[in-house]
């Protein structure tokens, strides 16, 4: 069981780059290894993945890095022995040897914890069996399964004897999308895709019942459905104005009083408006900027297009920025040249009390520079790093493999994928140390570098398998506590 002492008053996120102190993750579970080619797209994967490689050679580094920064006693001086264990016991929630941190928390452990309560267990079994259309007998049988196994079944979809009860949840590794902390409030998502429905049900139960969130229950925000929606004919139900869906990758807490909400393939205008109304009424923030991006698989959420690196630095996709892709600047008439799509981008800023008079912002760079200068009171020059170093056609290629989706562990220290070479060059040009996760861990172990003193660093996470799931380190994190900037 995790130590829950001092866990109250520990939920607060008011920026994207304040030192990260606590977050929710989920290590790739057995369900990811069950994605079959014919279901990969339905389950929102671009390909099938090799689970062992994804865990051992990729995601496990993410965990070690997070622990080194957030809960160092769990890993300092132990990396060699952790790596030498062929069973990976350190990473397996619930098992002996599990790292069990109250700073880097896995949803699976949290689920196991709440399932110890018989009442919650009965409710959740009924709810899941309801959405998954299980038989009455299955529902009864699940009642006698002990919590750790039940938690594994709910997540992976399979019984211990490997029989599949329902589909796996391969996207649960992208914890960002299930909810978002906005100051000391928790906004739950409403997933756009059926493949992610069970995830949000599990998240509801975790946020409402886990003791970590106990004193925040009245600060959990759930977005309502449009009442009219129930009365609409099927073909009208899916319009952006009638549907209510929102995913965490479209919600970005950029400054203590300023929130960005993307309207995208996943988040509808209706949900964005409802969220804005609730947040203004509750006085959680006083500026909300809606960033409407093209509804395209390539750009499923705004955090696939830009993320913050440090107070005065952002990484973004130029095709949707002011500069545009350089192939267009040079007027390259080539069949590969992208269409001008920046006209599909629209940015409107709403100030509490003046919602009827939104301010239109012309482009992403203007918005991001304004956040750095005015919200974060940054005096240095604001810098932009472009995906693929803004070299055609690498901007789009590298955005597809999450060059713009970085997780800041602290101001200027980010984790991102190792495969986006041109973007990495751009970081080097800005004076960043670009270092492999394994090498950095070695240097931490040898006391040559320390998380506390590290500055301007891009930590490269191996990503051959992870990137097939179409999300990066920003998507794989749900920060619940960051220090104030
Ligand atoms: N915030 C994010 O962009 N999350 C990435 C989610 C990837 C996942 N395969 C999905 O399509 O939902």
Image (tube, rainbow, N blue to C red):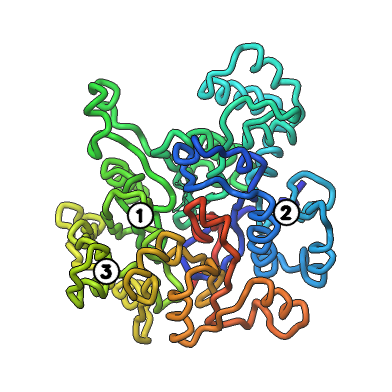
Q: Secondary structure at mark 2?
A: loop
Residue 3 is tagged as none
In space, the residues marked 3 and 2 are separated at their CA atoms by: 45 Å
The residue drawn where x is 48% and y is 66% is: 406
Q: Nearer the viewer, residue 316 or 285?
A: 316
Residue underneath mark 2: 5
Q: Is residue 286 above or below residue 49?
A: below
Q: Residues within 10 Å of mark 2 (few under 14, many from 20)?
A: few
| Image spot of residue 179 (x, y percent) | 48, 47
The residue carrying mark 3 has its beta carbon less than 8 Å from ligand 1:
no
Q: Is residue 467 left or right of residue 103?
A: left
Q: Residue 159 lies in what quarter of the image?
A: top right
Residue 62 is at least partly visible in this image = yes
Q: Residue 257 lies in what quarter of the image?
A: bottom left
Q: Is residue 185 above or below residue 324?
A: above
Residue underneath mark 1: 299
| Image spot of residue 414 (x, y percent) | 53, 71
**Contact, CB < 8 Å: mark 3 with mark 2?**
no
Q: Residues within 10 Å of mark 1 (few under 14, many from 20)?
A: some
Residue underneath mark 3: 321
The residue drawn where x is 37% and y is 86% is: 380
Q: Secondary structure at mark 1?
A: helix
Q: Earlier in the sequence, mark 1 or mark 3?
A: 1
The residue drawn where x is 39% and y is 79% is: 312
Q: Residue 342 lies in what quarter of the image?
A: bottom left
Residue 15 is at least partly visible in this image = no
The residue drawn where x is 42% and y is 39% is: 191
For the view shown, which residue lies furthest in the left direction? 357
Q: Earlier in the sequence, mark 3 or mark 2?
A: 2
């Amino acid at each position: 069981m995790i130590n829950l002492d001092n866990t109250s008053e520990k939920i607060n996120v008011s920026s994207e780059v304040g030192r990260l102190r606590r977050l929710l993750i989920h290590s790739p579970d057995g369900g990811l290894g069950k994605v079959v080619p014919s279901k990969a797209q339905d389950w929102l994967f671009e390909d099938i993945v090799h689970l062992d490689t994804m865990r051992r050679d990729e995601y496990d580094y993410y965990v070690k890095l997070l622990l080194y920064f957030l809960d160092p006693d769990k890993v300092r001086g132990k990396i060699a022995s952790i790596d030498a264990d062929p069973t990976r016991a350190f990473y397996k929630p619930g098992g002996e040897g599990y790292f069990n941190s109250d700073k880097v928390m896995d949803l699976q452990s949290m689920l196991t914890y709440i399932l110890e309560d018989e009442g919650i267990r009965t409710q959740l079994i009924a709810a899941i069996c309801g959405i998954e259309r299980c038989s009455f007998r299955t529902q009864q049988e699940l009642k006698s399964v002990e919590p750790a196994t039940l938690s594994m079944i709910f997540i992976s979809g399979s019984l211990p004897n490997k029989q599949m009860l329902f589909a796996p949840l391969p996207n649960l590794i992208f914890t960002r999308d299930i909810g978002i902390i906005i100051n000391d409030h928790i906004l739950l998502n409403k997933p756009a895709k059926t493949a992610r429905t069970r995830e949000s049900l599990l998240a509801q139960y975790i946020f409402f019942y886990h003791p970590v969130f106990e004193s925040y229950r009245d600060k959990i925000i759930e977005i309502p459905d449009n009442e009219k929606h129930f009365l609409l004919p099927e073909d009208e139900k899916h319009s952006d104005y009638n549907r209510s869906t929102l995913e965490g990758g479209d919600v970005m807490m950029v400054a203590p009083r300023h929130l960005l909400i993307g309207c995208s393939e996943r988040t509808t205008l209706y949900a964005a408006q409802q969220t804005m109304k609730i947040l203004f009424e509750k006085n959680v923030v006083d500026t909300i900027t809606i960033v409407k991006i093209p509804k395209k698989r390539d750009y499923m959420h705004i955090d696939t297009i830009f993320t913050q690196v440090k107070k005065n630095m952002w990484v973004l996709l130029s095709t949707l920025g002011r500069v545009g892709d350089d192939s267009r600047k040079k007027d390259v008439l080539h069949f590969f040249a992208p269409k001008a799509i920046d006209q599909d981008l629209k940015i409107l800023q709403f100030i509490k009390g003046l919602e009827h008079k939104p301010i239109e912002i012309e482009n992403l760079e203007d918005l991001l520079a304004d956040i750095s200068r005015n919200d974060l009171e940054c005096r240095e020059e604001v810098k932009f790093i472009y995906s693929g170093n803004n070299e055609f056609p690498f901007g789009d290629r590298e955005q597809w493999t999450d060059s713009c989706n970085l997780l800041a562990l602290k101001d200027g220290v980010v984790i991102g994928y190792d495969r986006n070479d041109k973007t990495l060059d751009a970081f080097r040009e800005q004076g960043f140390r670009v270092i492999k996760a394994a090498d950095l861990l070695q240097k931490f172990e040898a006391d040559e570098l320390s998380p506390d003193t590290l500055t301007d660093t891009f930590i490269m996470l191996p990503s051959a398998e992870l990137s097939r799931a179409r999300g990066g380190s920003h998507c794989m994190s749900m920060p619940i506590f960051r220090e104030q900037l």
